[in-house]
Each structure stands twice: as C-alpha cells, then as structure tokens.
Image: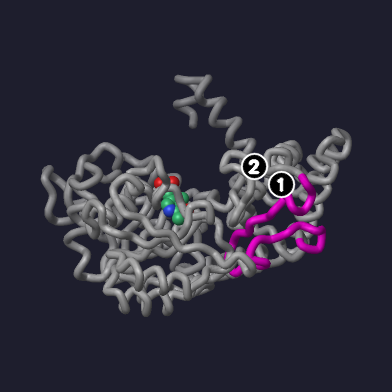
Amino acid sequence: MSYLMDFDKELYWYIEDEAKRQENEIELIASENYVSEGVLEAAWSILTNKYSEWYPWKRYYAWQVNIDKIETLAIERAKEVFWAEYVNVQPLSGSPANLAVYLAVLSPWDTVLWMSLDQWWHLSHGHPLNFSWLLYNIIWYTLDKETEIIDMDEVEKLAIENKPKMIIAWFSAYSRNLDWKRFREIADKVWAVLMADISHIAWLIAWWALENPVPYCDIVTTTTHKTLRWPRWAIIMSKEEFWPKIARAVFPGVQWWPHENLIAAKAIAFKEALLPEFKIYSRQVIDNARLLAKELQDHWFRIISWWTDNHLMLVDVFWSFGVTWKEAEIALENVWISCNKNMIPYDDRKPLDPSGIRLGTPAITTRWMKENEIKIIAKIIFEAVKNKDDENILKWLKSEIQWLCEKFPIYNK
Ligand SMILES: *Cc1c(COP(=O)(O)O)cnc(C)c1O
C-alpha cells in the first residue's frame, strides 16, 4: 500500500491497525473468514473501471469482450463447484440476492413458509423491518422445544394448511443438518417452490462435507464470504425454468451494474474451491467445530441442539454460567477472542440482550489450527467467562492467545 502510505497516512494506519488486529485475534464469528491473496489482487484490479450492465455477450455498453470472458469463467466454475444448472454471479451481496429471488418468484401478499426469526433465520428473510415482512404473508416453522431440532412434521403440517407459494430452508445459527429430501417432498406435495439459502455452509457443501441441496432445490442462494472465504458477494443458482426471471430480477429488478472486479475475484475463488487442499480444509472446519463443541460441553457449557453437524454452534452462556451474552462477549474480547451474540430458541431474554453467543471455526481453520489449539481455545473461553472480573487472569489468557496467533499467521507467513 505504498501509494496510500504517501498520500493518506491517516487512512493507511487505520487499515494497518485493522490488519494487526486480525492477525492477533482468534476469530470465532461464524460468518467471518480470511480471503486469499489471489482474491485480494483481483478485487483491487482495474476491472472496477468498467460498466457492464446485463449479461455476458448481451451488454449495453461497448467493449465488453474481456469482461464477458471473466464473468463466463466465474459462472462455469461455480456450476462445476455446486453442480448447478444455472448460476447468476451478479448479486452484490446475500440480502440483494434473496430480494431478487422473492421478486422473481413471488407477488405481493403471497404466502411464504420460512424459519422463525427468533430461531436464527436471517434478517433478510422476514424481519419486521425488512421489506419481506411488509410484502408477503409469512408463516413460520420452528424447532422442537425438547430436541431443539427442526420439526419436519410441523413443516409439512404448516405447508398443507397454508399452501405457500415458496418454502425457504436455512438459517444462520442452526448447527444441525437439514433433511433436504423431506423438504423436497413437502414442496412437491403442495406445489411450492423450494428455496435454500446456504450462505453459512456453502463451502462445506462445495466439498460434499455436507449434503448438497442444489439438486433438491429449485433455487439456492449463497453469500461467498462466510465458510466460502471469498470476496463479499453472492450468487444465485437455479433450475433452468427460473433462470430468465431471476436474471431480470437481479438486473434491473434490484440492482444496476455488477462489480466485475469482484466477479473476477469470485472466479479465482471458485478455482481455489476446486483444489484438493480445500477438501481437507472443509473437513477440518467440521472436525474443529465438533471438537470445540465437545470441549465446551466438558467445561459445562450448554450447546443448543446438543451438537453440531457443521461449522458453528450456539452456546447458552446464560444457562451455563448465569452471564449474559454481553458479559461473555466482553470477557472474550478482553482476551482477544471475537464472537457474536445470538438469540437461542424460545429465548426469554430480548433480541438485543439474548442468552447466547454463536461460535464458528472457519477462520481459525484457515489458519490451520487443529486439535491441540481447539483444546486450548475452549479452555481459554471457559477461564475467561468464569474469571470475567479478574484482570490479571484475563491478561494472562490474552498472552496465551497472542502466542497462538503468532504461531498461526494469516498473511504474515
Ligand atoms: C449472511 C447471510 C445473508 C446476508 O448476506 P449479506 O452478504 O451480508 O447481505 C443472508 N442469508 C443468510 C442465511 C446469511 O447467513
């Protein structure tokens, strides 16, 4: 960043400080990860200079030949990674991608069946302040209160009673597998469109560490910056019959020009996803999450839904130790571990002050932390929460974390 260092020292140092923070903390926010240097190079490239509305080989502006090749490359690679029939790589982010799908499939006041928000659906699916709540008739399905697992019989019952136009599967804090086959059967029974939002587990699916819902669903959206450690962006995959409507809904339905520099970054990322080492990575993410869940259980933390099948877990810190998420988060921040607050199912506490924290292993696995480190991290989480008011202990725990981070650098290898 030599230009920046000369021209704008203030900004330069802000970015440098953030880089240092990222190197020195243990990142357990389940939706964050580190992109490769290839992705950084493409994302910064001169492609940002070009306007390119509409789709490859059918554009409005002149001189698209290079852009068309790049976008086609991204599309073809994405199809190969996910076994998708059609892929739209233009959505600017996960929320606009979901918005485009609703616009393509639904009319105002149509009935949609999706997962209850207080049970960890994403805000872009039916939050009262989101347009989806204002426009559509939303029916929720929930988790079984005892097992904290999605109750597929309830999904079926609600579908038969309400005849939704679309059924949506997925969440941002559920740690168990979904029964894709059953979702398909239910959708077929009531002639509903089946949509999945796999933002959180896309990478694990790309490598078949989790079952791939793309063959079961009519439409699948995913962000590309969570377990997929790629640029901030999203894609929409669909069966052939939905493709023209989705194409129009993305442009000009919800957005204008695509950011071709980020589409190029995505093309690199999809190429990375096809390398065998990432298969090892995705299995390791899950192994690490399962071990972390078990170690935390051994330290008396309650894990929601009892277990994890994927990369994340929800921890009921209030039940476990009588501390609120805020106290837990601050204790962890003091030792340089980051996590985020989350409602737990049937939470008695308020959305802004819930009982749980969400933890995930994609980022620490990108640093190639494994069994030994996971055990150390679990113990530090326990000690930090237990000794949240003891400055000396927190200081000592922080030095342990710094030592771990230095041993497993992100970029400063
Ligand atoms: C993160 C997330 C989104 C939103 O993605 P943005 O790129 O932040 O807009 C949508 N759906 C789910 C399930 C998510 O986890």
Badge 1, how many Cα within 10 Å: few under 14, some, many 20+?
some
Q: Three-letter amino acid code at disc 2?
A: Glu
For label 1, being within 8 Å of ligand 1 is answered: no
Assess disc 2: are there few (<14), some (14-19) or many (≥20) residues with their C-alpha within 10 Å of its C-alpha.
some
Residue 353 point in image, percent of width and height: 63, 40
Mark linked to residue 390 = none
Residue 367: horizontal and vertical position, in percent?
63, 54
Label pair 2/1, CB-CB below 8 angstroms: yes
Residue 17 visible in the displayed image: yes
Q: Which residue is mark 2?
A: 23
Say which element carries label 1. Answer: helix
Say whether residue 119 is left or right of residue 399. left
- Which color scheme did the rendering employ for the protein? one colour
Is residue 313 shown in magenta?
yes
User: Looking at the image, which residue is at 33% across and 48% down?
Assistant: 132
Q: Nearer the viewer, residue 206 or 381?
A: 381
Residue bearing mark 1: 405
Observer-nearest residue: 269 or 109? Answer: 109
* Residue 198 image point, x, y percent: 44, 62
- Residue at left 59%, top 42%? 350
What is the magenta range?
A: 297-322
Name the residue type under label 1.
Answer: Cys
Q: Is residue 205 above or below residue 265?
A: below
